[in-house]
Amino acid sequence: MSAPTAEALGRLWADGYTVVPAVVTGPLLERLRAEADALVAAFEAGHRGDDFWHFTREGESAPVLYRVHNLEQQPGATLAAGLFAAGPLHHLAETILGAPARARVIAMIVKMPKVAAAVPWHRDRTDAEPGRAVNLSLFLDDSDPSNGCLEFVPGSHLLADDADAQKVRTAGPVLTVGAQAGDVAVHDVRAVHASRPNPTARPRRSLVIEFVPNATEAP
Ligand code: NI
């Protein structure tokens, strides 16, 4: 895997996000993609559960999957459970955080072709100091502005806990952040961000793991 460059780390601490290219490649990336295909196919075939988050579009009957929460606990998510336990994302997180780190939660974000909605502007949480909790998004598909890539307001991770995400977005600037399959987009959990809808025929899936230093107390 590639380690983050000093430039990428500098961008992360200044802007609140960065992209580290080609962290997971080759057979592991292909197997993770196949595992994601199977999880989505299971939902399409009628599998339901509290962790399979979905919505129904107005005037439609078919539910649209958008998130598989607690991914490491799902039947068939063996490889994702492995990534949650150890491996390249842990190494990357420890380099970024500068300390031994643990994974708190893993989810799969699914932006289904044609039907995926935008994710509204938000911060993941603000009960961590800047630089003390990061979300790593391993992209399983290429992501660009047309199929639901991430968007950020640079520097917004440094704002006060009670900053209003929508007002911050309106004040801008807003930067769109594309990624290739296998890249990891890293963002401070405090960063103000969103993601676009996916009107294209291309899926856009990512595995998101939050990391904190081992010494961090709950949550
Ligand atoms: Ni988020």
Image (cartoon, grey):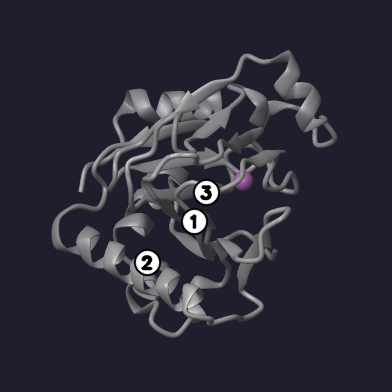
Q: Earlier in the sequence, mark 2 or mark 1?
A: 2
Tag 2: Cα neighbours inside 10 Å, few (<14), some, or many (≥20)?
many
Name the quarter where the C terminus is drawn: bottom right
The label nearer to you, 3 versus 2, is: 2
Residue occupying image coordinates x 33% and y 48%: 141
Q: Which residue is mark 3?
A: 135
Q: Quadrant of the rendered structure where residue 180 is? A: top left
Residue in the foreground of this view, choosing between 133 and 200: 200
Structural distance between the alpha carbons of marks 2 and 1 = 9 Å
Mark 2 C-beta closer than 8 Å to ligand 1: no
Circles 3, 2 touching at the beta carbon (< 8 Å): no
Q: Is residue 76 visible?
A: yes
Q: Which residue is mark 1?
A: 110
Mark 3 C-beta closer than 8 Å to ligand 1: yes
Circles 1, 3 touching at the beta carbon (< 8 Å): no
Query: Image height check: is 25 above or below 16?
Result: below
* Residue 1, percent from left and from top: 20, 49
Q: Which residue is mark 2?
A: 36
Residue occupying image coordinates x 50% and y 63%: 103
Query: Image height check: is 113 above or below 37?
Result: above
Tag 3: Cα neighbours inside 10 Å, few (<14), some, or many (≥20)?
many
For the residue marked with disc 2, what is the amino acid? Ala
Residue occupying image coordinates x 60% and y 66%: 62
For the residue marked with disc 1, what is the amino acid? Val
Left or right: 26 as drawn, with respect to 134? left
Q: Earlier in the sequence, mark 3 or mark 2?
A: 2
Q: Secondary structure at mark 2?
A: helix
